[in-house]
Amino acid sequence: MNNFCHTCGHEIIVKSLYKPKTYCSSDCRDYMKFKNALEKVLIALRPTIEAKKIIRGDMFRLSNSVSNCTNTFEEK
Ligand SMILES: [Zn+2]
C-alpha cells in the first residue's frame, strides 16, 4: 500500500510496513518543518504597521518562489 507526500502530493513507494514515510524527500520534510516554525514566529510577532506590510510582501514573494514545474501527468 502506498501513500502520498504531505508536502508535494507525490506518491511515496512504501518499502517498509513498520515505518511509513510522511514525506518523499528531505526538501519536503524541511518545507513542513520550516513552515510550522515560521507560522509559530508569525503568530508571536507584534510588528508595526509598516513592518507588517514588509512581512506580508516577504510572504507573497515566498509564495511566488514555488516552482511552476509540476508533475502534470498526475493532474486530473
Ligand atoms: Zn514530497
Image (cartoon, rainbow, N blue to C red):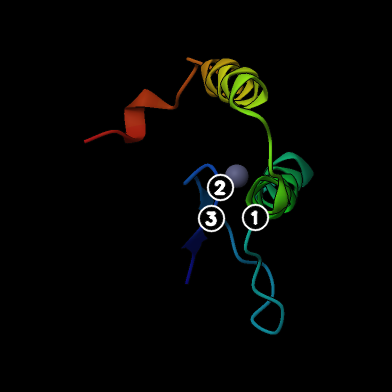
| N-term-proximal mark, 3 vs 1 | 3
Is there a contact, CB below 8 Å, between mark 3 and mark 2? yes
Q: Residue at x 59, y 26 (%)?
A: 49
**Residue tagged by mark 3?**
6
| N-term-proximal mark, 1 vs 2 | 2
Residue 60 horizontal side relative to residue 45, left or right = left
Q: Residue at x 66, y 66 (%)?
A: 21
- Label 2 is placed on what type of residue? Thr
- Label 3 is placed on what type of residue? His
**The residue positioned farthest toward the bottom in the image shown:** 18
- Looking at the picture, does residue 5 appear above or below residue 57? below
Q: Residues within 10 Å of mark 3 (few under 14, many from 20)?
A: some
Q: Residues within 10 Å of mark 1 (few under 14, many from 20)?
A: many
Within 8 Å: ligand 1 and the Cβ of disc 3?
yes
Within 8 Å: ligand 1 and the Cβ of disc 1?
yes
**Residue tagged by mark 1?**
23
Secondary structure beneath dot 2 equals loop
Is there a contact, CB below 8 Å, between mark 3 and mark 1? yes
- Residue 53 location (% of width, % of height): 57, 20
CA separation in Å, label 3 and label 2: 4 Å
**Residue tagged by mark 2?**
7
